[in-house]
Image: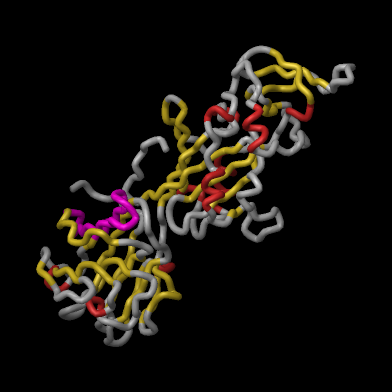
Amino acid sequence: SSGIQPQSTWGVYELTILMDTLSATSPVVSEESPVPNMVAETKAAEAAATIPASDAAPMGTESAPSTTAASTVPQPPPFCCNHTDPLVWTPYGYGKIKNDEKIKREDDLLVIQLTTGGVAMLKSSLLHREMTLRIKLLIGNRKVMAVRTCPHEAIVDIKKRICQGLKDVPPENLKLLYAMGTIQELVDYRSISEYKINDGANIVCFVKQSFVFDETKMGSSMQLRNGGLTVYKCGSSYETVLGSSFFESGKHYWEITVDKYMEDEDIFIGVARPEVSLYARPPEAEVFWGYLCTGGKIFAPDRPLENFCEGSRDGDVIGIQLDFSAGANAGQLSVFRNRVYCGTPFMNLSGPLYPAVNLYYNEAQVSINSNACCPPR
């Protein structure tokens, strides 16, 4: 960990580049899998995500990788890429093949010009044009993802490969950071080799949490509009809709705009567990916490409504921040009204928690913005 704290709506993934394929204790989904390179969550997989610094030779050093690393981590695949650029990965960092002719020796050596300076004579079995990226998800259900790449591949294409295993996350919502002395953001049009990233290096990947209302998790009298960003109420009864993403770690912020407010005791905004009843009044739903637009009150399971701040009507914007920085069982829910901090009424929440809205009256309507930036307190 580089000690970087996620920004407002950014959750965090830790991306680890391994020296080679994953160990047998970390079961990788095969190339034929519909979701490429996903790895089931296991403690063994998490343990395999970290390679001791002593087990990997820093790029450009004068000594080969230690035998300890070779014995605990399988070797990379054979040198078989047909890319026309002669750039390859060696035990000493990146290098270029100076010629395609093998030296006439039984050792089967090739001459390599190292990018860090100097020349090496290495067997072709030590040269690799492919690398394995191993991504450890530290939010949600904690999965591990493995992605094959090569030194020439653009960062944006690596992001696309990562996104294949993430639901509804476009590449532009990923931010890759590499910490080696200083912290660098990996720019889309550049490649792994341009940053001189070692096999075994750690990369931090921030993921902006974009989500909408989920049509599979809402009351039957609700209608989604605007691509799931807006929910409209038909009929008068308590009905809840959940967001398409849940949270149990990290720090997250989103905003709900009151498009149309109808009557008293309407529009409950907050977070709920997945088992919440979609047809219950939120204070009686047992797993729903948040802010009530009527009178600016707060509500929680088995508690009476409590005065909190000013109420809200048409055009008002309610911001919700869910912060698990203090721990998985120490989630804090803070409320903002028209981008002004109102307070943190709920502590010690534990996930998974979904963004949630409950509407009662006919024609009530709200819209969600999951890309809003959290205002200062």
Tell me if residue 208 can be seen: yes
Front residue of this view, candidates 369 and 281: 281
Q: Residue at x 18, y 57 (%)?
A: 344
The relative height of residue 40 versus residue 56 in the rendered view (above or below) is below
- Colouring style: secondary structure
The magenta segment: 319-340
The relative height of residue 313 versus residue 55 in the rendered view (above or below) is below
In the image, residue 296 lies in the stretch drawn in magenta = no
When asked about the image quadrant of residue 260, the answer is bottom left
Front residue of this view, candidates 299 and 21: 21
> Is residue 193 left or right of 350 when viewed as pictured?
right
Image coordinates of residue 194 in percent, x first then y, are 57, 28
Front residue of this view, candidates 284 and 54: 54
Q: Residue at x 23, y 62 (%)?
A: 318
When asked about the image quadrant of residue 293, the answer is bottom left
Image coordinates of residue 216 in percent, x first then y, are 45, 75
When asked about the image quadrant of residue 231, the answer is bottom left
Tell me if residue 82 can be seen: no
If the image is split into quadrants, where does the N terminus sit?
top left
> Is residue 241 left or right of 114 when viewed as pictured?
left
Image coordinates of residue 235 in percent, x first then y, are 30, 87
> Is residue 295 left or right of 207 when viewed as pictured?
left
Image coordinates of residue 283 in percent, x first then y, are 22, 76
- Image label count: 0
Q: Residue at x 28, y 78 (%)?
A: 285
Q: Residue at x 59, y 38 (%)?
A: 18
Which residue is outermost to the top?
118
In the image, residue 335 lies in the stretch drawn in magenta = yes
